[in-house]
Amino acid sequence: MPNVTANGIRIEYDTFGDSSFPALLLIAGNGAQMIVWDAEFCELLAKTGLFVIRFDNRDAGLSTKFDEAGIPDIMAAIKAAMEGKTVESPYTLNDMADDSVGLLNALGIEKAHICGASMGGMIAQVISYRHPKYALSLTSIMSTTGNPDLPYGKTEAIAAVVAPAPEERKAYVEHFVNVWRRIWSPGFPFEEERVRTFMEKSYDRSYCPQGMARQNTAVIAGGDLRSLLSSIKVPTLVIHGADDPLIPVEGGKDTARVIPGASLLIINGMGHDMPKKVWSEIAAAISHHTAQAKV
């Protein structure tokens, strides 16, 4: 896969579809490599007339790692945030948004439809208010606003996500298969074979659990973004699972409420993942949304 130097770091990326089509930038969530956007799903989007770009965020996959920053204390960061104190983080969501825009610049793309899931949704939101000239539209999936009054995810789901990952390959894969079980869509069968294959590919491609911890700290440090989200003017679609155990659906509802004119799609039975059975619905929603935005 190709890579570019942008915002002072190396960014690994991949594309699908005709480069003459409007660009759609897909931003992955916490700790996830760009392959979390399954190639089959990307092809589905490309067939709707979009030039699809997926990439590795900093500290994930084959993009630049920030190992010199060490491994942050996640529980200390959470405690500081709950007490209203400053959260120390090696970098911020602003930095990650700047990475995304840097990639677009490096590819010669002046404007793109911006779509992110989970942490990627937060980065997409930041791009939309921090770099509005680059955003044709915003799609925020299974994300939130940072509103401290929103309900927390289920304890067992949060514990599974923040638990240390084993170093040995087999144990690592089993660990994350169990993590996915905890956050999976209760309305859909667990796709163990797909999840296991994805985690094996992820481990072989880049083992960097400390990067996930640093990204997580950036999310925690982001705090309450509502006042900034209220300034977003690009057409916005919010997609959320009704049964998300990690970021409850109230996060999606709050996002749609705060961003002026945002549309909200709630998918029954969906958790903090995208089962194959919802791919066509999500792709159709994104295609319709992007088609409505001015290019």
Image: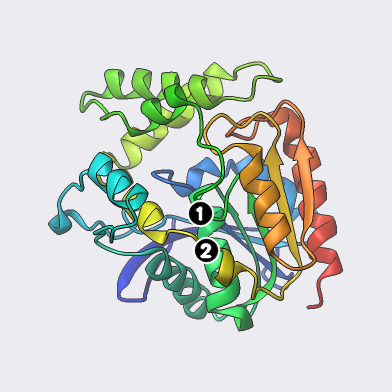
Q: Is residue 232 left or right of residue 122?
A: right
Q: Is residue 225 left or right of residue 66?
A: right
- Callouts 2 and 1 close, C-beta under 8 Å: yes
Q: Secondary structure at mark 2?
A: loop
Question: Which residue shows up at 55% across the image and 81% down it?
Answer: 108
Q: Quadrant of residue 134?
A: bottom right
Q: Residues within 10 Å of mark 2 (few under 14, many from 20)?
A: some
Q: Quadrant of residue 280?
A: top right
Which of marks 1 and 2 precedes in the sequence? 1
Q: Quadrant of the C terminus?
A: bottom right
Depth check: 141 or 87 in front? 87
Query: x, y (%) of residue 172?
Result: 30, 24
Q: Secondary structure at mark 1?
A: loop
Query: x, y (%) of residue 117?
Result: 57, 49
Q: Which residue is mark 1?
A: 146
Q: Is residue 28 above or below residue 234?
A: above
Q: Quadrant of the N terminus?
A: bottom left
Q: Is residue 134 left or right of residue 187?
A: left
In the drawing, what numbered circle is on residue 225?
2
Amino acid tagged 1: Gly
Question: Which residue shows up at 74% across the image and 69% down it?
Answer: 21
Q: Is residue 78 above or below residue 223?
A: above
Question: Which residue shows up at 49% across the image and 60% down it?
Answer: 224
Residue 43 seen in render: no
Q: Is residue 272 above or below residue 168?
A: below
Amino acid tagged 2: Leu
Q: Residues within 10 Å of mark 1 (few under 14, many from 20)?
A: some
Q: Is residue 295 above or below residue 116?
A: below
Query: x, y (%) of residue 27?
Result: 53, 56
In the drawing, what numbered circle is on residue 18?
none
Residue 191 seen in render: yes
